[in-house]
Amino acid sequence: MGTPYWFALMFCWTSSFSSAFSSHHARKDRAIVSMEMSTQYRMNKSIANQLPVIPVIGPIIKAKPLMIGGEMTLDPPTPLQWKALQECVVVHKNQLNNDSDQKDMQTATIDAAPLIAVIDDATGYKSVSPPFTQFREGGRYATLAAVVGINSKQNRGLFDEDEESFLDYMDLCPVDDDDDNIVPLSSSVRLVGVGRAVLRKFFFRVPTELCPDPNQPDYSVLPNYDEEEFYDINDTINHGYEDNTPIVMASFEPLVDDASVYSIADPDKIGEKGQKSYRKSPVHALSELNNLSIRVSRLHDDRKKLINGIKTAKARLRLYDENLKDLDGLGALFESTDENPTNILEEEEKHMTVDEFLATFKGNMMRIDPSELPQNQPTPLEEVENLENYGLNYYGAISSIPQLTQNVAEQLAPYYSSKFRSREEYNLEISSFVAYRCLEGYVSKEEMSWSLHCTSSIERLAKAYNLLIEHIWLLKSIAKKMAKEVEACGEECTDLW
């Protein structure tokens, strides 16, 4: 079954502007692509000059940015989210059952899985603009997610985490408590980020009806319900998951990296002494991108070694404290009451700075929490010490970046054409997103959002490199402090890493 037109168009656009390194005939390729696009437009005059549309969920409050290759779980999905999931499944099935019917080719579908656009409160606040766009103004960012799995707790054990394909498990009958139907309140849906998009125009759509399969003439999905009975909202039965509320849709442009310019030089400083060229030849640009990716991978490995050394030293200190016992009782004779934790806490409470006093003064209408004062803010070193696993998340704690890149490439293979995946810079683009996923435990949501908005792989890798350098310097400071404490315990410790 062929790839739908909008998705093939996405690959044509990205390939013509992103494959400078894999082809020495870029102009010829762009001419061929333009001819193919013109022919396809003439065949589909009804949808010419129109962007593809997709169901939208969100903004999802307090949700982490959905990275490329990352996962998000809706547990459970809200009524509006469930209706959007149903819509993407119906459109997907209609496309599979009626491949020759072009009446709904405007809706974004691919063969691998149903697609949906996800907006979170971290990435959706800023407007973005894809390279070579025909629009002057930017649009709202969203992550294109594949709806891949569902886990229903109905008739299952509490700790049963078996997952089924969402497309196979989805039942379009009215949602109630019957055994044959899904209960959204007891289900969790898993989404996987497979792409990026710029949303242009929002509108509402009445839920699409599922077309019968032409290979099964007697096939029927929905029972013959009376319309009023079908849309009767009974919160005690369906909790609002089945009604005639319109679905939020949006037209969008695919957001991809611009590989025609692989240089981190500032174009505003061209001509200054020591300034490198903003544009480079394909060979030099790809070499620079590859070298930067290797350096990022090595820094990530160094970071793992540092954290393992710090954790080892901490375990040794904990063991020393447990073995340090006052067997003869002499330690109690020299114990000072001033060092009692209770007395120390009382002494700290007695002392108050002028700013803290003014912050708690009753006449001050603009009261400030003492913990929010500048002098009471933790230092960057203390922040890293307080992070879980010192800022190294579970995703990057075991494997290296090249291994993770290969896994993500295999995960995304069903969602991209072989032509798009055959580009020389394809794995390097994925590597830049993997590097940021490894930094998720250290950087803020704003940094993660920037990586999704960015359309340059080398800029993304360069910033990840600087963040890794910053994290490693803080970890080395912690390691030096831990080494001194271990040496004070009688251990010979010169290098924790």
Image (spheres, rainbow, N blue to C red):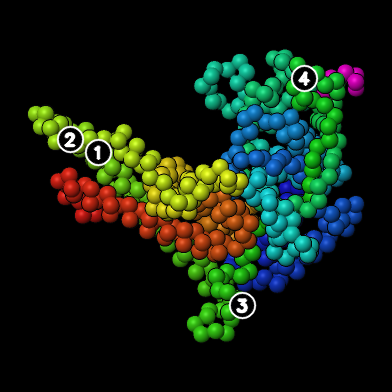
Is residue 224 within the magenta segment?
Answer: yes
Res 322 → quadrant: top left
SS at mark 4 in the image: loop
- Can residue 432 be spotted in the picture? yes
The disc, 4 or 1, on the residue closer to the chain's N-terminal end is 4
- Residue type at the position of mark 2: Glu
- Residue type at the position of mark 4: Asp
SS at mark 2 in the image: loop
Q: Residue at x 58, y 74 (%)?
A: 266
- Residue type at the position of mark 1: Glu
Tell me the CA gap for discs 2 and 4.
66 Å
Report the quarter where the N terminus lies.
top right
Marking on residue 335: 2
Tell me the CA gap for discs 2 and 1.
8 Å
Residues at discs 2 and 4 in contact (Cβ within 8 Å): no
SS at mark 1 in the image: helix
Above or below 26: residue 323: above
Q: Look at mark 1 in the image and give the residue it sits on.
A: 339
The disc, 1 or 3, on the residue closer to the chain's N-terminal end is 3
Tell me the CA gap for discs 3 and 4.
60 Å
Q: Look at mark 4 in the image and give the residue it sits on.
A: 235
Query: Is 303 in front, or is 371?
Result: 371
Q: Position of residue 419 (x, y in %)?
A: 64, 56
Residues at discs 4 and 1 in contact (Cβ within 8 Å): no
Mark 1 or 3: in front is 1
Q: Which residues are magenta?
A: 220-229
Mark 2 or 3: in front is 2
